[in-house]
């Protein structure tokens, strides 16, 4: 299967108090990572107070996904917002650890854990 044939991930968003959660199910690769980056940038530009990316159901996470998260982190910081928190599946966590992105984005095992960290101002 080439990149053009990759199944598109399911991206949904909802709110938990003042936090917006973007949930991704499926694969993130170069054919669709721009969608994730743009969705997050649009939400940040709309003024969301806090953003959590729930990637716990991402089954494949290419380097373009890491680049998208880097862009989201920089865009968020330029707006002076709280850190973007990430709920990471095992494969996503491994990719973020290998590239040292885990030192730039707070990683969590579960959505509840991430929401607690956001509420605590971590």
Image (cartoon, helix red, strand yellow):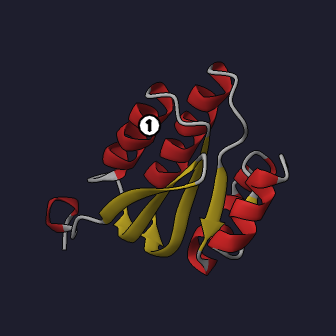
Q: Secondary structure at mark 1?
A: helix
Q: Residue at x 67, y 53 (%)?
A: 85
Residue 83 pos. (x, y %): 72, 41
Q: Residue furthest left?
A: 5
Residue 41 pos. (x, y %): 44, 33
Residue 115 pos. (x, y %): 69, 61
Residue 116 pos. (x, y %): 77, 63
In this rendering, the answer to whether 5 lies above or below 51 is below
Residue to which mark 1 is pinned:
43
Q: Residue furthest front?
A: 17
In this rendering, the answer to whether 34 lies above or below 55 is above
Q: Residue at x 30, y 66 (%)?
A: 9
The mark tally for this picture is 1
Classify residue 25 as left or right of residue 52: left
Residue 60 visible in the displayed image: yes
The quarter of the picture where residue 10 lies is: bottom left
Q: Depth check: 35 or 17 in front?
A: 17
Q: Depth check: 30 or 10 in front?
A: 10
């Amino acid at each position: 299967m080439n990149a053009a044939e990759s199944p598109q991930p399911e991206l949904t968003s909802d709110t938990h108090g003042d936090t917006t959660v973007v949930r991704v199910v499926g694969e993130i690769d170069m054919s669709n990572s721009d969608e994730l980056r743009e969705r997050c940038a649009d939400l940040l530009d709309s003024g969301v107070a806090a953003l959590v990316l729930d990637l716990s159901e991402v089954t494949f996470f290419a380097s373009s996904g890491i680049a998208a998260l880097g862009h989201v982190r920089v865009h968020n910081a330029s707006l002076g917002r709280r850190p973007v928190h990430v709920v990471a599946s095992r494969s996503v966590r491994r990719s973020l650890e290998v590239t040292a992105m885990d030192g730039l984005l707070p990683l969590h095992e579960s959505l509840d854990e991430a929401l607690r960290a956001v509420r605590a101002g971590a």
